[in-house]
Image (cartoon, rainbow, N blue to C red):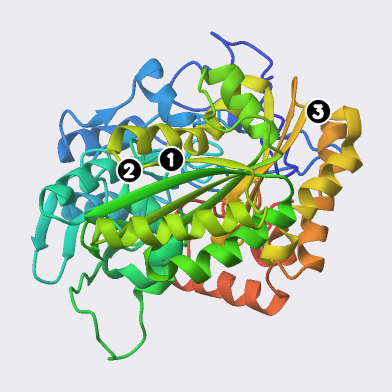
């Protein structure tokens, strides 16, 4: 008898298999017997497979005729698509499809809609909340081969491209034209722009250029029934009717499959400077930000912070070296402008003020690309360093800036020695904290001590339990800490209207509507 136990407590789902197997999670034949049953327990959220159709040989034959050579069925070939980047969540899909055009996506979803086959959209699979991998045996619809740049207008700075374009490749293309992408992420070398839009990714440039809700001008989306919605406008201003693209930005693939994006790109700054500074307290970090914002004004493009435990992990596991030693907190400040003399003068004036007033105890400044990348790596690679510490409980929180680090302090005091590390870093300029807790291995008792404490604390401060990572599978049942019941019901109604069979990225983002609950 095969079984799958789903530990659903906001951090991961961990599957344990028993029965006649070729190996853990490897079924015999095309059906995924390991996903057919759930063993509920009093301490777990039991997730049962909804009554979707099951993949048959005829279905695979149809897809192979539709896109020959771009249908993946082999066990080892499918495996990487079933596991998230953190290796914390795993599905058991037997099929990956790699369309190249919107027409192919439309035919796939029309067929899946008719056959009631569930689908998981997947881009670069760099998400941190389990939103881009199957929960059971959903078909994976990958944007990997939808990687063409459709057009770029150097006058307006508007880029139109397919959803599978890798963010870093887009930025490299734009830099050759004298422009840059309005967002930058640590995962830029792997993440796809379609996935960025579907999750409303924030990142390192949001302080300067705003969120994707402002920079995305248009989308092309295929709906659950296969119909294509062409809202791929390249207009800055269009005040005719509802702004439908906003429904799909941040919808995590639950309302439609994004196939193309139109996005406004800023000009590449001619002068970039990065300062890496040490502060003796978080109060000094906040005061430094206030002074920095006032003195640097329009050239301030990033203000990031990290605590000393983050730096210790980066140094220990990645062998990187901090230019500022033994500081409780570190701040990375980036300026971007068009006049290097003007920008350096403003930055130097700020640094003199910060040092003279005791806000900053030590620091360094980089002006050339190589040194700038070295300083940024200290911040961008924290996530990577954390993975060397064992199991990581990750929380992506929005809070009033003044309370940002209080949560880290309170969690650290609450957990004591039961956690290996409790660290805090993030986009202070946006009020976005990345709270990470590490342990040697997954512990249910530790998770009970963390949740719902972190979410209740955040709600009391009128914060958001997900600033930029989304809800995915891991956080969907906690949405009530950030949204009122009426808002959740309205979201469920949108979902039911656009995807009445619920085939698009099921089990993600929203708690099950009462009439569709299988528990």
Where does label 1 land, which residue? Answer: 186
**Residue 433 horizontal side relative to residue 214, left or right:** right
Where does label 2 land, which residue? Answer: 367
Residue occupying the point 83% across, 45% down: 411
Camera-side residue of 212 and 82: 212
Camera-side residue of 452 and 416: 416
The image shows residue 83, relative to residue 200, as above or below, that is above
Look at the numbered disc 2 and give the secondary structure of its residue: loop
What percent of the width, then of the height, locates residue 65?
16, 36
Camera-side residue of 69 and 61: 69
Question: How many callouts does the rendering have?
Answer: 3
Look at the numbered disc 1 and give the secondary structure of its residue: loop
- Mark 2–mark 3 CB contact (< 8 Å): no
Looking at the rendering, which quadrant does residue 245 occupy? bottom left
What percent of the width, then of the height, locates residue 271?
26, 53
What percent of the width, then of the height, locates residue 143?
28, 43
**Residue 186 horizontal side relative to residue 107, left or right:** right
Look at the numbered disc 3 and give the secondary structure of its residue: loop
> Earlier along the polypeptide chain: callout 1 or callout 2?
1
Residue occupying the point 84% across, 37% down: 41
Q: CA distance from mark 1 to mark 2?
A: 20 Å
Q: CA distance from mark 2 to mark 3?
A: 45 Å
Marking on residue 443: 3
**1 or 2: mark nearer the eye:** 2
Looking at the rendering, which quadrant does residue 448 occupy? top right
The image shows residue 284, relative to residue 243, as above or below, that is above
> Earlier along the polypeptide chain: callout 3 or callout 1?
1
Farthest bottom residue? 240
**3 or 1: mark nearer the eye:** 1
Q: Is the residue marked by circle 2 packed among few (<14), some (14-19), or many (20+) residues within 10 Å?
A: some
């Amino acid at each position: 008898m095969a079984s799958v136990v789903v530990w659903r407590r906001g951090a991961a789902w961990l599957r344990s298999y028993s029965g006649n197997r070729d190996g853990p999670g490897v079924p015999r034949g095309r059906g995924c017997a390991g996903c057919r049953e759930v063993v509920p327990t009093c301490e777990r959220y039991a997730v049962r497979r909804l009554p979707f159709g099951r993949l048959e040989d005829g279905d695979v034959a149809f897809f192979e005729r539709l896109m020959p050579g771009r249908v993946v069925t082999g066990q080892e070939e499918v495996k990487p698509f079933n596991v998230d980047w953190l290796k914390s969540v795993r599905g058991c899909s037997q099929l990956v499809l790699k369309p190249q055009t919107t027409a192919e996506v439309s035919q796939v979803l029309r067929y899946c809609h008719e056959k009631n086959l569930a689908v998981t959209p997947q881009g670069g699979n760099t998400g941190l909340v389990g939103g881009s991998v199957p929960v059971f045996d959903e078909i994976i619809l990958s944007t990997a081969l939808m990687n063409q740049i459709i057009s770029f207008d150097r006058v307006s700075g508007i880029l139109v491209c397919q959803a599978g374009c890798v963010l870093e490749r887009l930025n490299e293309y734009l830099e050759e034209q004298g422009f840059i992408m309005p967002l930058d992420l640590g995962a830029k070398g792997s993440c796809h722009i379609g996935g960025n839009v579907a999750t409303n990714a924030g990142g390192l440039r949001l302080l300067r250029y705003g969120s994707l809700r402002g920079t995305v001008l248009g989308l092309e989306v295929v709906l659950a029934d296969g119909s294509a919605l062409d809202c791929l406008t390249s207009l800055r201003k269009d005040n005719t009717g509802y702004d439908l693209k906003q429904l799909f930005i941040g919808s995590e693939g639950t309302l439609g499959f994004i196939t193309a994006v139109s996005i406004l790109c800023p000009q590449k700054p001619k002068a970039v400077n990065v300062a890496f500074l040490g502060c003796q307290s978080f109060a000094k970090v906040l005061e430094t930000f206030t002074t920095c914002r006032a003195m640097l004004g329009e050239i301030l493009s990033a203000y990031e912070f990290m605590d000393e435990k983050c730096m210790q992990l980066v140094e220990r596991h990645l062998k990187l070296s901090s230019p500022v030693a033994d500081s409780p907190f570190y701040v990375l400040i980036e300026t971007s402008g068009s006049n290097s003399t003007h920008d350096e003068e403003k930055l130097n004036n700020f640094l003199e003020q910060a040092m003279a007033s005791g806000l900053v105890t030590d620091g360094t400044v980089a002006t050339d690309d190589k040194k700038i990348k070295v300083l940024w790596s200290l911040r961008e690679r924290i996530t990577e360093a954390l993975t060397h510490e064992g199991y990581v409980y990750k929380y992506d929180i929005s809070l009033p800036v003044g309370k940002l680090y209080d949560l880290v302090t309170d969690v650290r005091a609450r957990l004591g020695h039961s956690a290996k590390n409790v660290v805090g870093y993030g986009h202070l300029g946006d009020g976005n904290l990345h709270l990470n807790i590490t342990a040697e291995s997954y512990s249910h008792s530790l998770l009970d001590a963390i949740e719902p404490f972190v979410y209740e604390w955040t709600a009391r401060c009128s914060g958001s339990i997900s600033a930029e990572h989304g809800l995915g599978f891991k956080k969907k049942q906690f949405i009530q800490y950030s949204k009122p019941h009426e808002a959740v019901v309205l979201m469920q109604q949108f979902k039911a209207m656009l995807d009445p069979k619920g085939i698009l990225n099921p089990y993600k983002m929203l708690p099950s509507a009462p009439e569709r609950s299988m528990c």
